[in-house]
Amino acid sequence: MADLPLLSIDVSIARESFLLECRLDIHGKCTAIFGPSGAGKSTLLDLINGNLSPDRGIIKLGKEILVDTSTQAFKAPYQRQIGWVPQDALLFPHLNVIDNLLFGHRRRRDSSHSSPSPHQVIGVLGLDRLLARWPRELSGGEKQRVALGRALLSNSKLLLLDEPLASLDAKKRSEILDLLDEIKHEFNIPIVHVTHSLAEVMRLADQLVLIDQGKIKAAGSIESLMGKADTPMLSDRRDAGSLLKLNDLTLVEGRPAVGLLEGQSLFLPLQAGEWRLPARALPLRVYVPAHEVILALEPPNGLSVRNKLACRIERLIPQTSQTMLVELAIGQQRLLASVTTAASEELGLRADLPVYALIKSLSLDVPAGRNLLSDSEHL
Ligand code: ADP
Ligand code: MG
């Protein structure tokens, strides 16, 4: 059954004045749960890992029932084979790093499914030099890496990460992002991570769950949710934009990288140099902010803009009192452009109209770009 969801959730829980009501199937290797502070993200993770029991409902991990209030079935956290990394990376203060790492590993040696070895995990997370240290001798980022390692080694069928980057500075954040990317590719363990950063979502996740005030607002693949002009919580943001997937990339030394988007070229703000493109980077994701896209009825001449994509208008949705969000189809992919209502009327924009989307290559963001530039050491 290829279609069996990783997690299937149908629960409600009341916490004082807060009510979480959620029906959700989670598929995919890496799912981001995205929403503002207080939305119920940590509560949802606590229901999955067994720290909380729902007032009503059922949660299944594959075929395994984790909790079912109708039959009073409830698996305790230690019975769930779920690795959980809370925001504050709790380590056992009386155990040094290696014993923290091996804590769950020893206890669950009986497990039948394969999981990464301590050697692999220590290597990927760069923990070799920390093994004899005590938690009080570690920085925030180091603690976070040990907590991740411990979760990876606990024979988990699923990794739950609660804002793994929130308490770190920008440099550490990008290091841990690289590591999570590595974990995603190295170890065959699905990840569900909570975040309120769209940048983190675009870098790591395949699937996206949008949650606000205890309710699921939308769920699906990240490209499909970001490409629609009416996705709650995304399309009304100032930085609303879409993610394009490039299936091919041409790199010529000293020239800008050129991606292939449904048969059309897209010039990227990456200069091809000594770096190589790891196969796993494809399809490459490119983020295009909607307010950076200009629409033209005719293919323009004499402009410095590199990217002129032939598209068709799928639909127009009012975004603010003065702007429209235009959903454009380029083959199967969707690109969003925001234009003023006045400009939209002047050009006569309407569904099915063929148009050209003009995008400066400098307006494009390649969330994994840094990884491409530095990847040679990993290969
Ligand atoms: P998020 O992780 O999205 O920021 P939480 O799941 O932590 O949100 O919290 C959702 C709501 O539940 C908040 O309104 C919060 O005040 C409330 N809440 C969280 N923990 C408790 C608790 N232990 N007791 C009562 N209410 C709680
Ligand atoms: Mg939280």
Image: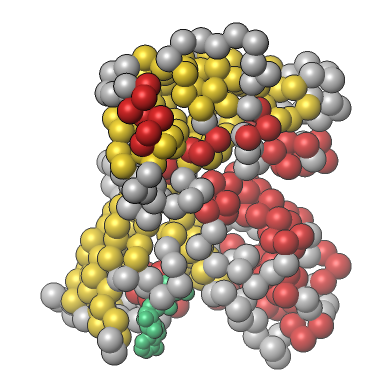
Write the residue at 34% across / 66% down. Answer: 212
Give the side of residue 313 with respect to residue 253, left or right.
left
Q: Which quadrant of the view contains residue 358?
A: top right
What quarter of the picture does the N terminus occupy?
A: top left
Give the side of residue 60 with respect to residue 332, left or right.
left
Frontmost residue, 375 versus 16: 16
What quarter of the picture does the C terminus occupy?
A: top right
Write the residue at 55% across / 17% down. Answer: 308
Q: Position of residue 139 (x, y in %)?
A: 78, 76
Q: Which quadrant of the view contains residue 360?
A: top right
Answer above or below: position of 298 versus 130: above
Frontmost residue, 240 versus 42: 240
Write the residue at 60% across / 78% down. Answer: 88
Q: How is the image coloured?
A: secondary structure
Q: Position of residue 371 (x, y in %)?
A: 72, 41
Answer above or below: position of 342 versus 104: above
Write the residue at 64% across / 16% down. Answer: 303
Frontmost residue, 326 versus 320: 320
**Residue 261 visible in rendering:** no
Frontmost residue, 113 versus 267: 267
Answer above or below: position of 109 versus 344: below
Q: Position of residue 327 (x, y in %)?
A: 36, 31
